[in-house]
Amino acid sequence: MKYIPFTKNPPVVAVIRLQGAISNSGRGLDNPGLAPVIEKAFSRGKPAAVALEINCPGGSPVQSSLIASRIRRLADEKKVPVFAFVEDVAASGGYWLACAADEIFIDDCSITGSIGVISANFGAHEFIGNYGIERRVHTAGKSKSLLDPFKPEKPADVKKLKGWLEDLHATFIDYVKSRRGTKLTDHPDLFTGEVFIGQKGIDAGLADGIGHLAPVMKQRFGDDVTFKRYGAKRSILSRFGSRFVDEAIGGIEERVAFGRFGL
């Protein structure tokens, strides 16, 4: 029908799936991989809206910011509304992505929030010492070996790390406030890294309502609305060799990220 002159085409909603952890390693969700997907979703045809299907436990704050900024830039340029639909979880960086939408819908069991920043690694200096291994590091610049996991932790290093985390946390909070505005409540745990389940997330102002993609979009744009899905495509050959190993590692990292929320 769309090729017949003088006929009205049904509205189209472009759907972008954001599944998995946000990574700066080339695995999972990142800005370079999602850039062409997002560009196509906003630019092909004249979508009535863009819908984000989100199932994301978080990850890199920079990649979260870059992806969300790209979505907002195109939404403003094209004047296309954006809706987020959260599945199991939109936490930490995943919630950052959800805030790129004009409205956020969740399931009764969805996890939202975790507005905080975390840094974790291991200290192995005692382990290598027990095996007679000597760590030799030479630097030019007193901060070049900061937080070396093979050296005893220094209080000064920890103080610097906490300062970085606090700066990132403040940026995250400012972004959420800029996007959610007066919808946010004064819940005491809103910015502590706490997570909220279903209706509690709505009550705190993190989401706008309970709703799933197809029913909500049909309610907004009519029963004849159609959906066009966009996602990164990979060749069959890319699943083998080093790519296979890389994806296996990425899968483990992703399971750990989802495991923080019991998923």
Image (cartoon, rainbow, N blue to C red):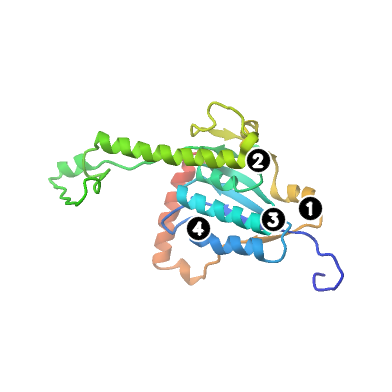
User: Which mark is first along the chain, 4 or 1?
Assistant: 4
Instruction: Describe residue 225's horizontal placement relative to residue 263 as left or right.
Output: right
Residue 62 visible? The answer is yes
Of residues 47 and 253, the one drawn nearer to the viewer in this rendering: 47
Tag 4, which secondary structure? helix
Residue furthest out toward the right: 6
Instruction: Give the residue number, with chain letter if any, for mark 2.
Output: 107
- Point out residue 197 in the picture as x, y percentages from the top left corner: 59, 34
Q: Choose mark 1 or mark 3, whichever is in front.
A: 3
In this rendering, would 95 be left or right of 12?
left
Secondary structure beneath disc 2? loop
Label 2 – label 1 distance at C-alpha: 21 Å
Which mark is nearer the camera, 3 or 4?
3
| Gap between marks 1 and 3 measured at Cα | 13 Å
* Image quadrant where one finds the N terminus: bottom right
Dot 1: few (<14), some (14–19), or many (≥20) neighbours within 10 Å? Answer: some
Q: Position of residue 249 (x, y in %)?
A: 40, 55
Q: In the rendering, at what x and y percent does residue 155 appear?
A: 26, 34
Three-letter amino acid code of the residue under disc 1: Phe
Residue behind mark 3:
80
User: Which residue position is annotated with label 1?
Assistant: 221
Occupied quadrant, residue 86: top right
**Identity, as a three-letter code, of the amino acid under mark 3:** Val
Residue under label 4: 31
- Relative to 127, say whether 68 is above or below: below
48 with respect to 190 (left or right): right
Dividing the picture into quadrants, the one containing residue 118 is top left
| Residue drawn 78% across the image and 49% down it | 220
Query: Which mark is in front, 2 or 1?
Result: 1
